[in-house]
Image (spheres, grey):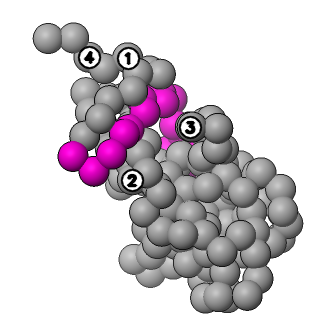
C-alpha cells in the first residue's frame, strides 16, 4: 500500500480533502501556507503534535499572513497571534481571544501516513470586525 501523495485529492464521507504537505514540513510551534481550492490556508503544528488549519487571512490587518504568526498557548487554548498586530486566535475554533466578535475560518485537517490533508471550512470566518 502506498502513502498518499502531496497534492492528491480524495473524497471522504464529509467532502473532499486535499493532501498539502508532509507533517514534518510544518515546523513545531510554527506554520506554513498552502493554496487549497484557490484559498490561502495556514497550517500549524503545536508542541503536542496537533495540526490545525485556518484561513491565512488576518481579519484585522486584511493581509494574508497568519501562517507567519506566533504559535503558543493561553492555559489549555492553543493559539496563533497575528504577526501584524498580535491579536490571538484559538486554533480550534478560530475565535479571536482578544475580541470574540472576530474569527478566522477553521478547516477540517487530518494527518494520514505523515501527510497533512485539509478539507472543508468547518467554521465561518467573519473576515473582519463585527
- Disc on the earlier residue, 3 or 1: 1
Q: Quote the CA–CA distance across marks 3 and 4.
A: 20 Å
User: Alpha-carbon distance for marks 3 and 1?
Assistant: 15 Å
Residue labelled with disc 3 = 36
**Residue 123 located left or right of residue 109:** right
Q: Which residues are magenta?
A: 13-31
Disc 2 or 1, which lies upstream in sequence?
1
The CA span between labels 2 and 3 is: 12 Å
Whether residue 51 sits left or right of residue 70 in the image: it is left
Comparing marks 3 and 4, which lies closer to the viewer? 3
Which residue in the protein does label 1 denote? 5
Describe residue 31's horizontal placement relative to residue 76 as left or right: right
Q: Residue 108 shows which numbered tag?
A: 2
Q: Residue at 39% of width from left, 27% of height from top?
A: 9
Residue placed under numbered mark 4 in the picture: 3
**Dot 4 lies on which element?**
loop
Query: Quarter-wise, where is residue 55 in the image?
Result: bottom right
Q: Can residue 79 be seen by looking at this rendering?
A: no
Amino acid at each position: 500500500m502506498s502513502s498518499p501523495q502531496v497534492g492528491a485529492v480524495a473524497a471522504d464521507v464529509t467532502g473532499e480533502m486535499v493532501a498539502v504537505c508532509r507533517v514534518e514540513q510544518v515546523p513545531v510551534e510554527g506554520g506554513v501556507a498552502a493554496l487549497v481550492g484557490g484559498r490561502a490556508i495556514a497550517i500549524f503544528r503545536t508542541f503536542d503534535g496537533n495540526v490545525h488549519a485556518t484561513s491565512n487571512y488576518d481579519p484585522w490587518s486584511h493581509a494574508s499572513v497568519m501562517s507567519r504568526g506566533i504559535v503558543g498557548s493561553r492555559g489549555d487554548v492553543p493559539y496563533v497571534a497575528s504577526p501584524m498586530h498580535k491579536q490571538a486566535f484559538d486554533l480550534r475554533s478560530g475565535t479571536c481571544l482578544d475580541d470574540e466578535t472576530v474569527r478566522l475560518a477553521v478547516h477540517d485537517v487530518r494527518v494520514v501516513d505523515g501527510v497533512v490533508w485539509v478539507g472543508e471550512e468547518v467554521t465561518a470566518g467573519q473576515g473582519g470586525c463585527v
